[in-house]
Image: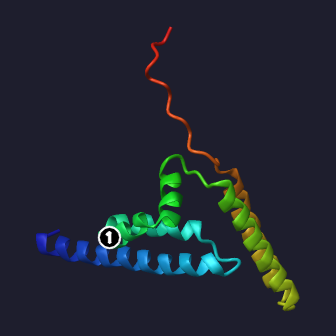
């Protein structure tokens, strides 16, 4: 591959990362208020994509405690806090209730429920606290 082709390819990659970051950030913000749409997962996806393609978006995320805490927890042991787990479970429950109240076709209720159960299973299996670093100040005996 020539140098010009590599430059063109890396420019396209940057725009793809930026697009992923922006879309996932928008979805995360919507998910913060809309039941059934996850926030944590989209914040993590946005952090990953922005770290590769948009330092401006990444700095924005890390400047907001709401986002920064989720990102740092994930980077330090793939941790999801108990609070976020509970909010996620409540959000999925509200979403299921909305589906049932609006008499959505059974197939969509089943598909949605299966998706939410898979998501819940994954979320609740993640640790809730960042693992403590071993104490290196004491000598091994």
Which residue is at the front of the view, 22 or 114?
22
State left or right for residue 92 relative to residue 31. right
Image quadrant holding the N terminus, namely: bottom left
Mark 1 neighbour density, 10 Å: few (under 14) some (14–19) many (20 or more):
many
Q: Residue at x 39, y 80 (%)?
A: 19
Picture coordinates of residue 97, whole percent (x, y): 84, 80
- Say which residue label 1 marks: 53
In this rendering, the answer to whether 139 lies above or below 79 is above
Picture coordinates of residue 121, whole percent (x, y): 73, 58
Picture coordinates of residue 56, whole percent (x, y): 31, 72
State left or right for residue 138 relative to residue 3. right
Q: Residue at x 58, y 82 (%)?
A: 30
Picture coordinates of residue 27, whole percent (x, y): 54, 79
Which residue is at the front of the view, 51 or 67?
67
Residue at the extreme left: 3
State left or right for residue 9 relative to residue 82. left
- Quarter of the image where one finds residue 50: bottom left
- Quarter of the image where one finds residue 103: bottom right
């Amino acid at each position: 591959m020539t140098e010009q082709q590599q430059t063109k390819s890396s420019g396209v990659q940057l725009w793809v990362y930026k697009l992923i970051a922006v879309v996932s950030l928008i979805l995360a913000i919507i998910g913060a208020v809309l039941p059934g749409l996850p926030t944590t997962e989209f914040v993590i996806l946005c952090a990953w994509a922005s770290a590769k393609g948009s330092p401006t978006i990444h700095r924005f995320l890390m400047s907001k405690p709401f986002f920064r805490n989720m990102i740092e927890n994930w980077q330090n042991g793939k941790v999801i806090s108990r609070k976020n787990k509970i909010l996620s479970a409540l959000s999925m429950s509200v979403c299921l209730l909305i589906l049932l109240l609006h008499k959505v076709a059974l197939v969509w209720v089943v598909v949605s429920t299966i998706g939410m159960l898979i998501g819940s299973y994954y979320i609740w299996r993640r640790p809730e606290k960042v693992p403590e670093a071993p104490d290196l100040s004491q000598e091994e005996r």
